[in-house]
Amino acid sequence: MCQECGCSKPGPYKVGERLVGSHTHTLADGTVVTHAHEDGHTETHGQHGHAHAHQILNLNTGILNANDRAAEQNRCAFRALGLLALNVVSSPGAGKTTLLTKTLNELKGRRRAGVIVGDLATDNDAARLRTTGAPVVPIATGTLCHLEAGMVAEAMKQLDLRALDLLIIENVGNLVCPASFDLGEAVRVVLHSVTEGEDKPLKYPPMFHSADIVIVTKTDMTAAAGFDRELALKNIRQAAPHAKIFELSAKTGDGVKAWCDHLASLTAKA
């Protein structure tokens, strides 16, 4: 996970056009002190003319504990607003943005949706999603391979949440680190493309076990990919026995309506 690979080391990230920065240093007892600055600047320790907050994080648990607190704050805000929040995750190239574009178009008139979309760099996915007319806030995470609850909280400030009843959070393409980071969502949706093979759920059990919904995507490529549907469904049920499963092709539209009908039926208490 991120605690071991080091990708959770704080660094500057971009929410919309605003740079949010932070830096760290390690104390003698092994804890990490994080200084966050909304304008993305750094400073040296000693005499300086401005005040800032200090947060001390234990290397093993501090990052996730802080994230969990921020996630609970997000969750409370979503509930208070009657806003259904989805965290959509997958490996890179599984088709999240294409499916979400179809979903937003299908839900017009049924749901007032907004999107927060995370990627390491560029706002290409955000630009594609904006073609639906939905409000979209991009987060460029820089070195981070996942979204964190604090990033989502910053992005929420750029949306009129009272004008929405559905918030879709498109996470960074990664099946490892996002599994550990609660964003405050009510529903976690994991995509599994037929082009990835049948054993992805068994290779990444924490992510699939955390899923409320698993969507098998790109079903139009089943034959070309030599995809064993029954084996894949068996593996999904083994890794995520509680998850609801949808099979669809965003390209042809097969199965998209069933997914969207289910999504439209969910409430903020889902």
Image (tube, helix red, strand yellow):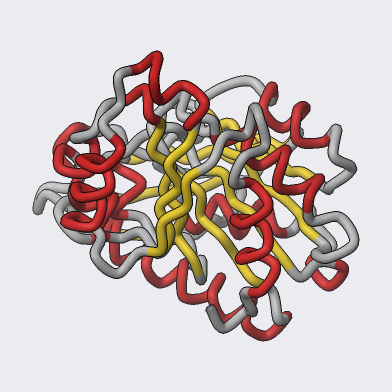
Q: Is residue 47 visible?
A: yes
Left or right: 84 as drawn, with respect to 63: right
Q: Residue at x 64, y 54 (%)?
A: 168
Left or right: 160 as drawn, with respect to 244: right
Q: Is 75 rendered above or below residue 7? A: below
Q: Is residue 2 visible?
A: no
Left or right: 265 as drawn, with respect to 231: right
* Image quadrant in which you'd find residue 17: top right
Furthest-top residue in this view: 224
Q: Is 256 rendered above or below residue 129? A: below
Nearer to us in this view, 140 or 266:
266
> Residue 92, position in %: x, y?
43, 26
Could you tell me which quadrant the N terminus lies in? top left
Q: Is 245 rendered above or below residue 226? A: below
Nearer to us in this view, 42 or 22:
22
* Number of numbered tags placed on the structure image: 0
Left or right: 63 as drawn, with respect to 83: left
Nearer to us in this view, 152 or 110:
110
> Residue 130, position in %: x, y?
82, 36
Nearer to us in this view, 195 or 79:
195
> Residue 134, position in %: x, y?
84, 47
Q: Residue at x 55, y 50 (%)?
A: 151
* Image quadrant in which you'd find residue 132: top right
Q: Residue at x 70, y 47 (%)?
A: 103
> Residue 228, position in %: x, y?
26, 31
Q: Residue at x 48, y 32 (%)?
A: 219
